[in-house]
Image (spheres, rainbow, N blue to C red):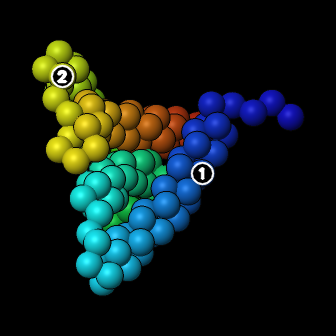
Amino acid sequence: MKKGIIYYLNEVEEKFLVYSFMFSLALVFVQVCCRELGHSLSWSEEIARYLFIWQCWISVSLAERSKVHIRITMLTKNFNQKVRFILEILVNAAVCAVNVFFIFWGVKMVAFLISAGTTSTAVNIPMWLIYAAMPIGSFTYSLRLIGNIYQILTGKQEV
């Protein structure tokens, strides 16, 4: 069975979210225990925060795959099939356009941070690695939206 890019995207997203969440949970737990013992870790909160940023941006794409984004179906359920079809295409295209905006400006911000050489305070992580979450998450989300549009147009997805 041939596995396509979406299969690998699913695998990477799922594994990243599961393992990064487990790591974040353990990290915050250790930080709380250390703080209770009077030995606060200066770096753990920073790493947990940056992992959370990545988790948020990556989970947007995964949420689209599972169709769990908030939708206002109260308005569209009373329309006929043709109007719902057009609205679905327009909504997916509009969200994709917003993602293109995020990708464009996110890449510009990452390029600026690479040239500036900015690093985080506690662990000296290059800040471009943190900011890269936005264009990467927006790109993967866009792939899913384009897939939705294709499936709607070919009749493989009901509206």
The amino acid marked with disc number 1 is: Lys
Which one is nearer the viewer's eye here, 41 or 150? Answer: 41
Tell me the residue at 53%/49% (across/down).
Answer: 16
| Residues packed near mark 2 inside 10 Å, few (<14), some (14 to 19) or many (20 plus) | few
Q: Which image quadrant for residue 32?
A: bottom left
Label ID, residue 140: none
Question: What quarter of the picture does the N terminus occupy?
Answer: top right
Task: Answer whether residue 101 is visible to the viewer in this image.
Answer: no
View extreme (right): residue = 1
| Residue linked to disc 2 | 117
Task: Answer whether residue 45 is visible to the viewer in this image.
Answer: yes
Which one is nearer the viewer's eye here, 71 or 48? Answer: 48
Q: Position of 155 compared to 75: left or right?
A: right
Which one is nearer the viewer's eye here, 12 or 92? Answer: 12
Label ID, residue 15: 1
Q: Position of 94 compared to 139: left or right?
A: left
x and y, in percent, of residue 129 in the image = 32, 34
Q: Position of 158 compared to 34: left or right?
A: right
From what the image shows, is residue 140 above or below residue 17?
above
The amino acid marked with disc number 2 is: Gly
